[in-house]
């Protein structure tokens, strides 16, 4: 966790977001969820506007903590009271993780606690589960969701002006907003400037290889995760075989055994 924004910078961010908020009410979404995530919007123009406005404003703040990183995806995220649980997940693979790491900078716009759905993580779960992650690939922990949430998640209380910087491979989760106020946040998914962005796609459920596409931020502003990648070059195929982890497997990996 880092102290990211001064009070003056928070005020400036609020001004940026006020213009974007005016455009959110009429949005439709590709994915049916009980929270609102701008990435799921069916309007590429709005997703691009979010990317441009927030990215331009926040880049200099991110530069204080990340050396030569650039955004790939920028999200606005709202949880209305009584809604908003985000299931346990890892973020997708955005770079060749044998060579580099992508990160998410998660910035709540009000104080975030377990009550209103703050970030929760499984410590030491980054880099030890699977390097192959995308909407077409089954989660290796799918059969362990209950155990992970009950035994291994740790909530992070975050004050306004602070941010959580996550390795995109870490297991994380946010609970339902049980407060009486909307819990809003923004997220910047970022990669090193000099590392190509990639996207894995499993062509069919029984495939023994993955298609590898070279992508960029423009791809993600129009990408529908229910569909195969389109309009970007396929640059490789990699062997693929991935089963489910047992709880003992998980414990050994996050304990470093």
Image (cartoon, rainbow, N blue to C red):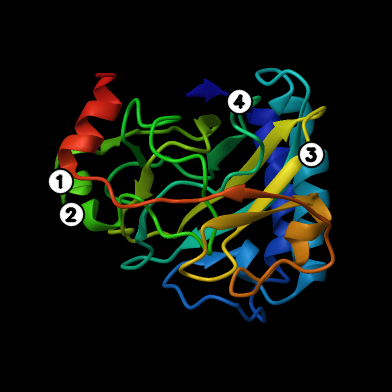
Label 4: element kind: loop
Label 1: element kind: helix
Q: Evaluate whether residue 118 shows in this view.
A: no
The residue indicated by pointer 3 is: 57
The circle drawn on residue 210 is none
The residue indicated by pointer 4 is: 4
Question: In front here: 60 or 223?
Answer: 223
The circle drawn on residue 150 is 1
Q: Are marks 2 and 4 in contact (CB under 8 Å)?
A: no
Residues at marks 2 and 4, CA–CA distance in whole angstroms: 33 Å
Closer to the N terminus: mark 3 or mark 4? Answer: 4
Residues at marks 2 and 1, CA–CA distance in whole angstroms: 6 Å
Foreground mark, 4 or 1, reads 1
Is 7 positioned to the left or the right of 55 in the image? left
Q: How many marks?
A: 4
Q: Position of residue 52 (x, y in %)?
A: 83, 50
Foreground mark, 2 or 4, reads 2
Indicate the quadrant where residue 125 lies.
top left
User: In this picture, is 97 found above or below 94?
Assistant: above
């Amino acid at each position: 966790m880092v102290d990211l924004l001064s009070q003056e910078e928070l005020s400036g961010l609020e001004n940026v977001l006020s213009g974007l908020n005016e455009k959110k009410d009429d949005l439709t979404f590709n994915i049916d969820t009980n929270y609102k995530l701008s990435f799921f919007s069916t309007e590429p123009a709005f997703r691009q506007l979010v990317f441009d406005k927030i990215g331009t404003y926040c880049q200099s703040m991110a530069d204080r903590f990340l050396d030569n990183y650039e955004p790939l995806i920028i999200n606005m995220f709202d949880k209305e009271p009584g809604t908003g649980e985000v299931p346990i997940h890892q973020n997708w693979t955005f770079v060749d993780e044998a060579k580099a790491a992508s990160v998410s900078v998660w910035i709540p716009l009000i104080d975030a606690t377990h009550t209103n759905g703050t970030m929760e993580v499984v410590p030491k779960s980054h880099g030890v589960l699977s390097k192959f992650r995308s909407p077409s690939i089954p989660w290796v922990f799918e059969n362990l969701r209950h155990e992970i949430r009950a035994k291994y998640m740790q909530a992070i209380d975050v004050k306004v002006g602070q941010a959580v910087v996550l390795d995109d491979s870490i297991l994380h989760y946010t609970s339902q907003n049980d407060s009486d106020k909307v819990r809003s946040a923004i997220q910047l998914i970022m990669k090193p400037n000099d590392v190509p962005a990639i996207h894995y796609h499993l062509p069919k459920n029984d495939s023994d290889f993955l298609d590898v596409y070279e992508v960029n931020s423009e791809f993600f502003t129009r990408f529908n995760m229910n569909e195969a990648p389109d309009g970007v070059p396929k640059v490789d195929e990699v062997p693929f075989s991935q089963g489910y982890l047992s709880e003992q497997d998980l414990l050994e990996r996050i304990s470093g055994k």
